[in-house]
Amino acid sequence: MPLPSPQRLTMLVFFLQPVAFGSWLPRIPDVQQALGLGPAGLALALLGLPCGTLLTLPFAGPLVGRIGPRMAILAGFVLYSLAVSLPAFATDPAMLFVALALAGSTISFVELGLNVQADAVEKATGSDIMTTSHGFWSVGIMVGSLIGSGLAGLGIEAQWAIPLVAVVVLPVALVASTALPVLSAEAPASEDQRSAWALPSWALLGICAFVFGITMTEGAMADWSAIFLRDVLGAEAGMVGLGYSVFAMMVAAGRFGGDTLKKRFGAVNTARICGTLAMIGAAMLFLAPTTPIALLGFAIIGLGVSVGFPLAVTAAAGLTDRSASANVAVLSFVALLGFLVGPPVIGLVAEQFNMRLGIACLVPVLLVSLLLTGRLRTRSARPGANPEAEIPGVL
């Protein structure tokens, strides 16, 4: 029986990577309750994940370049499958922070390998798979969240459920990763890496400000959707994970259709349409009187933010003041910063006021993103450039 094509294998591994982590997201309320944390305390503990990712980025790039993306994916999957279960065993907030930091470190490593591998497959086969691969990643985290919700509904403790998902997924992931072709990936020039942290242009700052609101919203949905459904609307254990599942499903749908929308309406108009939807969804979530209305809000937000990050990457790479890798490196840092800042801001507001007002904090940042969509006008990309592959740890 012939093996699937390199493109399909790559998409399969993109799909498998976030499944175990997705099963953790519906269990955040359980861990919060077990540790007796308020919204602010939970927000600080949840900072472990983006902190671990951010601290790993300077080391992950050179290491992946040295051992190759395929080996990075194989080794990363093993480490990630072990680390992703650790937060469920935390007995205090400090341990939860450290466990999430370890998980974030391994996630950034394997995701970097995936991006580099997808870029190498594109160059070797001449086919565009990066955006579609990211769509499969969104489907994977949605499936993981649904599985986590189902296991919670069955009364299976998080300490058993998350390792179970990881153990089931790991062998399949290793088989698929082993079958990936060994392809060379062109490393960015060292001078590009140095210039990535130089003072950015005003044009790049506008794009970064746009993407900050997008990734802040994505981080908020991952960390607070289950808490919102439980605390504000009284959803039961089997339902609290559906908010993020619906959100991730619509992110995937938007990514699968994003290229078509861009061809028809252009990057700026596509971003404006989606940005307006994201604001409508956030307002609907803030006002939601029932769980079904809230789920509709999550869906609209997911569709609204789905294409923001890929459009920002293309715009940053198209700037002519510096190399694509330099500008995209700055964008990747700001995108991670959005993930880092968003959840604790919402947690602190929720602690002082309530969770509805915490979620309402997304509306002004999404408005800023909407006002900055004009910064996404693209220029001609250099042949063979796949800037998304240069962004470690962000999918």
Image (spheres, grey):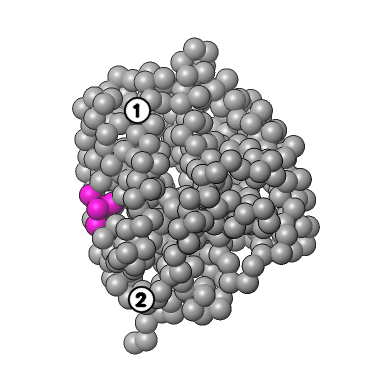
Residue 182 numbered tag: 2
As shown in the figure, which amino acid type bears the numbered disc 1? Ala
Helix, strand or loop at label 1? It is helix
Total residue callouts: 2
Foreground of the two, 167 or 84:
84
Verify CB contact (< 8 Å) between mark 1 and mark 2: no
x and y percentages locating residue 91 in the rendered image: 21, 27
Give the x, y percent position of residue 2: 37, 86
What's the magenta region? 77-82
| Amino acid type at image mark 2 | Val
Marks 1 and 2 sit apart, C-alpha to C-alpha, by 39 Å
Pinpoint residue 363: horizontal percent, then vertical percent.
65, 29
**Residue at x 48% of width, y 53% of height:** 193
> For the point 59% across and 61% down, which residue is it?
256
Q: Who is closer to the viewer here, 279 or 193? A: 193
Element at label 2: loop
Point 55% across, 44% down: residue: 198
Quadrant including the N terminus: bottom left
Rendering quarter of residue 55 = top left
Identify residue for label 1. 45
- Seen as rendered, the residue at the extreme top is 352
User: Which numbered disc covers residue 346?
Assistant: none
Question: As displayed, is residue 262 above or below residue 337?
Answer: below
Q: Could you say which is closer to the camera, residue 344 or residue 72?
A: 72
